[in-house]
Image (spheres, rainbow, N blue to C red):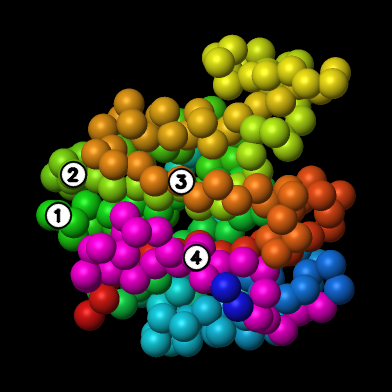
Amino acid sequence: MDVIKTNLLTKINFIEHGFFDRNGGESSGVFESLNVGFKTEDDAQNVIRNREIIAQNFNIPVSNLIILNQMHGNFVHVIDSKNIDQYKFSSQEQSLSIEGDSIITDQKNLLIGVTTADCAPILLCDPNAKIIAAIHAGWRGATSEIIENTFEKLKSMNCKYILASIGPCIQGRSFVVTNDLAEKVEKRYISYFNGRTLFDMQFLILEKLMKLGAKIVSKINIDTFLNSNFFSCRRQNGQYGVQFSGIMIKE
């Protein structure tokens, strides 16, 4: 199991974080091996065991690992002391019952995270307000205001010094899109090579984060489409697992 950390977030002494690759779990076949997605065709018990492995890496019970049923939308969940129990993991059914693509919390020992397989995981922290967030942003989310909505919530919670790290995702050199999709974004995010239309989603996300007021943004330049250590829905032709990225405030 390889867990990638960024210097930006590692310097914050009250949090733990990590962008996981696909290795070190219990799943097999196209889901080999650290697949954490219940919506895949993997065995649910393998997915639960893989979530337990990640939770153990953070020294927490698996109930404190929170992953939403991601919908490529723009809904943000804020977890606080009043509603925390409804989010704690208890079963596959419970995990899939809460839909959304962004989580914000100020609660300790609660590992919030997202799953990806080419989409971009974004981890955020305001070290002054001691609030963290995790965003799942594919091209649908990135163009339908999931990032904007998360920042709006954070600012309403008095977050003024937001740091952001973009994890491994499909890079612009690999993200072939249709002309219809290309017309939905500004031209500077689109390039053309050998008859292919390419979309630099990571660049779009980085610029959005800066425009919305992130003080510092770091990015990991790992292309999930080209790197077989990561799941990739495009490389694996629709049958694939998902890797985990998460952040937690330590006790």
Name the image quarter holding residue 17: bottom left
State the CA–CA distance, disc 4 to disc 3.
11 Å
State the CA–CA distance, disc 4 to disc 2.
23 Å
* First along the sequence among labels 2 and 3: 2
Q: Which residues lie in the magenta part?
A: 3-28
87 left or right of 27? left
Tag 1: Cα neighbours inside 10 Å, few (<14), some, or many (≥20)?
some
State the CA–CA distance, disc 3 to disc 1.
23 Å
Foreground label between 2 and 1: 2
Mark 4 lies on a secondary structure that is strand
The residue at 78%/70% (across/down) is 31
> Can residue 106 be seen by looking at this rendering?
no
* First along the sequence among labels 4 and 2: 4
Mark 3, residue position? 219
Mark 2, residue position? 161
What number is the disc on residue 16? none
Amino acid type at image mark 3: Lys
